[in-house]
């Protein structure tokens, strides 16, 4: 796929790897992309704006406020126009300082201000690059996590020799590899764009089943997978309703969120959207059972033991599967402790699903609470695809790509 006509913002901050960016600009231009370079003042120490302006065939922008000799009525609002104009924002190299600004919404130059004017539905690819210990520092890691939560894609730096002489992670990928990431981003967009204007209902997080007024039965689900799905789907123009259990996560941009506590509440809310939805993705860890009767007030500690009678909760996904029309898509998750594939395949059939995402809680870095997962995706056509450890956001892209296959190109 060529980049003909694609509009790319290229943000350069002051890492030594900036010296490789002119080559990236050449590669982008060769494929027909329009490139607007935004550069921090300090980045000009590493690479000349004249080189970048010549290669990109556009003036390089650094300051929000233009020099008085260059003022035109629109020149100081040009960061707003650029956010509207671009199809993609690439920031490479992204230094610790720039990551911190982007994560906290500071905007004191063109690179950072334009970042804020990019609508949340447009992709942002960030390539952190710095020395090993800086990269490992808690603040850099925290800021990267924040940016991922905000819907950006962080491409991890490569490991190798660093400018300081240290060896470790922190190297910016070579321009050819940055190009590969840009291509794969546009490829994903092309496929997932079939979900544009489709209505997607997503459940996320753990339900809480009350024992008394202060205690409940629940599980470790954080809601991260469901929120990543909601954010990615909205980014690609889908209408998204997200029904969520209690979580500290922020609602992704463009998503309508409904908060619930129990499985029964989730079921009641979900039913209201069953007819409406083109796709139902059930990412919630719904409690299978709830206490039969909630005790009024706080249960007193008067006996050595007590019994809690549990009754079955409604299976929300199975209900959707039962009543779904031919053109509605149902996607479920499976978390199995044994006979993984066999149970996932059974679930696919029993709940009348189109796709099942199987994950296992027994592997490091996968399952509840963490930002990564290892999944196998099974579809009703019988194909089974295993994937390595990936971020939940990348898994969300995979799942949405899979569901977009069910819709024709408009
Ligand atoms: O049958 P099991 O609970 O293992 O199936 C898991 C899938 O079913 C998940 O997608 C989960 O969100 C959904 N589910 C549901 N309602 C329940 C239990 C599970 O929608 N009561």
Image (cartoon, rainbow, N blue to C red):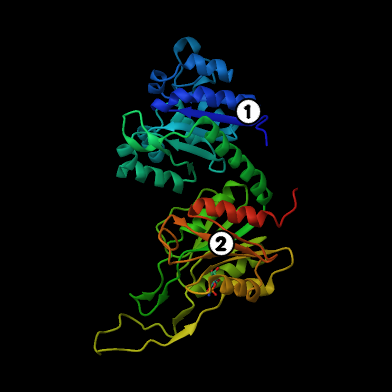
Q: Earlier in the sequence, mark 2 or mark 1?
A: 1
Res. 230 visible in picture = no
Dot 1: element: loop
Viewer-nearest residue: 141 or 130 = 130
At a point 51% along the width and 35% down the height, the residue shown is 117
List the residue tagged with mark 2. Answer: 376
Residue 271 in the image: above or below residue 169: below
Q: x%, y% of residue 397?
A: 57, 51
Dot 2: element: strand
Viewer-nearest residue: 48 or 83 = 48
Residue 98 in the image: above or below residue 151: above
Q: Mark number for residue 33?
A: 1
Q: Quadrant of ligand 1?
A: bottom right
- Among the 4 quarters of the image, the one containing residue 96: top left
At a point 32% along the width and 89% down the height, the residue shown is 306
Separation (CA) of disc 2 from disc 1: 35 Å
In the shown orientation, is residue 400 left or right of residue 116? right
């Amino acid at each position: 796929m060529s980049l003909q006509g694609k509009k790319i913002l290229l943000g350069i901050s002051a890492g030594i790897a900036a010296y490789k960016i002119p080559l990236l600009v050449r590669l982008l231009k060769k494929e027909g992309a329009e490139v607007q370079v935004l550069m921090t003042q300090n980045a000009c120490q590493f690479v000349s704006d004249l080189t970048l302006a010549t290669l990109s065939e556009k003036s390089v922008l650094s300051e929000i406020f233009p020099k008085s000799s260059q003022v035109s009525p629109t020149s100081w609002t040009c960061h707003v126009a650029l956010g509207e104009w671009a199809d993609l924002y690439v920031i490479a190299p992204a230094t610790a300082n720039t990551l911190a600004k982007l994560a906290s919404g500071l905007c004191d130059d063109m690179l950072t201000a334009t970042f804020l004017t990019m609508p949340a539905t447009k992709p942002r690819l960030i390539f952190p690059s710095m020395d090993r210990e800086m990269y490992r520092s808690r603040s850099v890691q925290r800021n990267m996590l924040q940016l991922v939560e905000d819907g950006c894609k962080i491409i991890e730096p490569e490991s190798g020799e660093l400018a300081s002489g240290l060896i470790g992670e922190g190297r910016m990928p070579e321009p050819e590899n940055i190009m590969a990431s840009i291509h794969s981003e546009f490829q994903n967009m092309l496929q997932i764009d079939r979900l544009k204007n489709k209505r997607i209902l997503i459940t996320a997080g753990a339900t809480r089943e009350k024992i008394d007024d202060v205690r409940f039965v629940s599980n470790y689900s954080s809601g991260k997978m469901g929120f990543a799905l909601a954010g990615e789907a909205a980014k690609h123009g889908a209408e998204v309703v997200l029904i969520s259990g209690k979580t500290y996560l922020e609602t992704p941009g463009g998503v309508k969120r409904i908060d619930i506590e129990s499985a029964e509440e989730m079921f009641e809310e979900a039913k209201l959207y069953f007819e409406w939805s083109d796709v139902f993705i059930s990412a919630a860890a719904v409690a299978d059972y709830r206490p039969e009767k909630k005790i009024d007030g706080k249960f007193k500690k008067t006996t050595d033991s007590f019994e809690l009678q549990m009754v079955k909760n409604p299976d929300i996904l199975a209900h959707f599967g039962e009543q779904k029309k031919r053109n509605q898509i149902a996607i479920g998750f499976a978390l199995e402790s044994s006979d993984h594939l066999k149970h996932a395949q059974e679930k696919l059939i029993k709940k009348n699903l189109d796709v099942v995402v199987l994950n296992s809680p027994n592997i490091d870095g996968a399952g509840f609470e963490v930002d990564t997962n290892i999944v196998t995706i099974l579809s009703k056509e019988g194909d089974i695809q295993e994937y390595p450890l990936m971020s939940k956001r990348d898994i969300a892209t995979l799942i949405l790509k899979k569901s977009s296959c069910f819709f024709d190109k408009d």
